[in-house]
Image: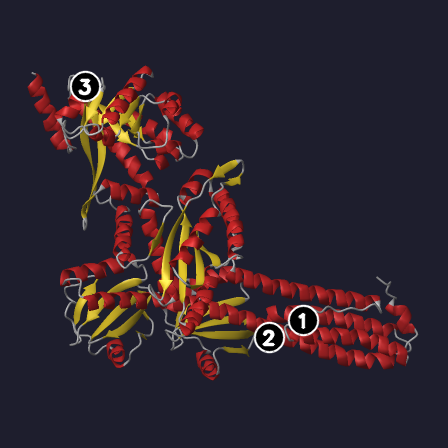
Amino acid sequence: MKKSRKLRDYIIRSNILAVLLPILMVGLLVVSIIIYYNEKEMQQKNHIITSTIAQRISQMLDKPIADLKEIADIMDRQILSTDKTMEYLETVVTHADYLEGLEIIDENGRVRYMAPFDQHLLGISRVNQAYYQIANRQEKAYFSTSFISQQTGSPALTVAMKHESKVLVAYLNLEQISLLSSQLSESYGNNMLVAITDRRGVYISYKELEKVYQREMDPNIQMIREGIQEKDFYTGKHRDHWITAYPVENANWYTIVYQSVDTLYGTVKRIVFVGFLVMLIFFVLSASITRRNLRKITHSFQELLAQTKEIARGNYERRVQTDSFEEFHQLAESFNIMVDKIESRNRRLRDLAYFDPVTKLPNASYVHDFLGKMLLKHQEANKKLAVIYFDLDHFKRINDTYGHTFGDEVLTQVGERLLAEENQSGTVARMSGDDFVCVLPEIKDLETVLEKINSLRKKFALPISSRDTEVYLNISFGIALYPEHGDTVGILLQHADTATSASKKEGRNKYTFFHESMKLDLRRKMDLEKGMRRALENQEMSLCYQPQVFAKTLEDRGVEALLRWHHPVFGSVSPYEFIQVAEESGQILAIGEWVLSKACEKLASFNGRLSHKLTMSVNVSTLQLRSRGFVDMVKKYVNKYKINPSLLELEMTESVFIHSFDEAVTILNELRGIGVKISLDDFGTGFSSLSYLRHLPINTLKIDKAFVQGMETDKDTEVMIDSVITMAHNMNLDVIAEGVENEGQLQAMEHFDCDMVQGYYISRPLTEEMLGKYFEKKNDENS
């Protein structure tokens, strides 16, 4: 780079009057253009913020409309009785935390159905209510003005929608939206304030919540409302703030951003200060000037002016180049740095709005925008589109086992593999957590969708490695097709997600196309998960006990504790159903501790009353065994109830060894160190080979009931059971055969020298009271 000359030496030989005037004029012009650009850039940024918030609020307000449409659809199909309709509305309100209540108003204006149920309000007339009158006059849904709910004390809103001769009403709780301003203030700082008002200007969300609950109005609402009537949004300066507002169209609300003027003019002041210093240097050091030198000086300013105009047009490619004076060179470098920072900030804003920082994939906001555009395009061209929703099977287990930092590293590598897939066909994005979506446009047939699914599966055929640990990932897919399964962004994504849940229910690592029947299955699972959170507190869960006896003498060896759940709505729920829900939701840890505590308590009680000592078998899940403090928890309850640890037997399946064989063996050895027994349950249905048994610190082997029941029709099964029992005895293991249901099976187990048996032929699972009678009867028979 050519060495710049000192301006001081040059200006001494120049004419100060010929230089100073154009410098002042150009300097004022440059400052004016910079101020104009900064104002425009601020307006664009605030417009993005207000429109994004308005869009997200609009999506939130679409949810109750979708609920009302789903209720209307069910009413049209007439598939529910009056009681079932009430129960269904209760289920919807319970499931949706944004709903305070639902009402169905008949053609006479009276409440026919409602949730939560209130005998005093059932049949009450709503004819004089404004929302009923307005909803009856218009086709689209009506949003009332906000109010403070008498039930919750929080801001609330009424949504009413006409359906044939009826009016469907939803009462919304706006508490989450009311907290939005204070949450955003933590992100944007004190120089920016975000507010949300209803159509009257009453605050729904404000940094100071007192203004929300006191129903204060925004002082500038009239000016904002008039400005938005002229164009889609409003922006303007008022006193010491810039105001930007954008409407929430479906509810006629406004999102408003107040930004302090100081944040806007801070950069301008610094540039003006630098410019003033430069001009002062020119003034003090200038002596004379010539036309030739004047052209050299003004050329640098012309470059700076041209660049400023290009920035005002949104072009950041051009940079200021000058080699005349060192001061000009420094000013150009500073100006170029400012342009780089503005361009980088705009890029970061776009990445923050539309891309996930962990996987580098597009995020949910991008998917909503992109899918919306694709639906319009496909609707006009009458073409089909597929939404493939997929997530990583058992990813929560990876987080629980190796930590969330490891989980994020896995997601980063998942993103790298999916980015390569996105370059081939379709748009792949991360929705949240381990949920991903692929939008496949212009599909010709279902074969195209299946080819895409196979392509995604191949991406994860090899394990993901991080920190010397390898994990294999399986993927469950759910597919929703446009227009067969929905014609809006929200419905297609929801139905594809529902289909993914169905794939998991079928055994994971599968794909499933959406079907209407899936909605009821998913709602039941969600209701079970929600009810499970209070099942222990409400004493809905209990233990039953199935006796285990010695095969040769039929003397009691002990009992196995079995968990039962009587749901207040669904009645008795199968353990095969609710145990899976408990494991997927993580509630198995709390439930498992309760089972262990109760079993130890009852073991101490039984052995305190009986003449012989019983063994209590308790089932332990993989998540329990791998959770922190499990060994200490077992010690706690053994000591608390003062039981002999050798009479407590923990049963676990072969799945505990899937993730880390060595880690599982270490934990089992610690449990053996306490003195408790370890039993390998359902042997023969898992992955372990017989050679693995010699390395396992176990006491007992339980043969799965499928083999016991299958030996009557399959001689090979008899040979296998005989071999397993012989091998187990050679390794000093006791053997229990479960599922013994007739005398022939009992005799066969005795013939094979099986140690103990368990099954309905001996006794079905018994309550604590029934178990006491069982022992009394056995004592009477033996005496």
Left or right of 153 on screen, residue 362: right
Quadrant of res 618: top left
Left or right of 137 on screen, residue 406: right
Circle 1: is it few (<14), some (14-19), or many (20+) Cα within 10 Å? some
Vertical relation: 460 (above or below) 759: below
Which residue is labeled 1 in the image?
A: 268
Please name the amino acid that badge 3 sits on.
Glu
Circle 3: is it few (<14), some (14-19), or many (20+) Cα within 10 Å? some
The image's mark for residue 542 is none
User: What residue lies at 17% left-to-right and 62% top-to-bottom?
Assistant: 80
User: What residue lies at 29% left-to-right and 65% top-to-bottom?
Assistant: 67
Which residue is labeled 2 in the image?
A: 40
The image's mark for residue 750 is 3
User: What residue lies at 47% left-to-right and 67% top-to-bottom?
Assistant: 52
- Sooner in the amino-acid sequence: mark 1 or mark 2: 2
Q: Position of residue 534 (x, y in %)?
A: 26, 47
Q: Position of residue 628 (x, y in %)?
A: 40, 34
Q: Is residue 647 visible?
A: no
Q: CA distance from mark 1 to mark 3?
A: 94 Å
Circle 2: is it few (<14), some (14-19), or many (20+) Cα within 10 Å? few
Q: Quadrant of the N terminus?
A: bottom right
Left or right of 56 on screen, residue 580: left
Mark in front: 2 vs 3 = 3
Please name the amino acid that badge 2 sits on.
Lys
Quadrant of res 249: bottom left
- Sooner in the amino-acid sequence: mark 2 or mark 3: 2
Vertical relation: 337 (above or below) 34: above
In the depicted view, which residue is nearer to us: 687 or 700?
Answer: 687
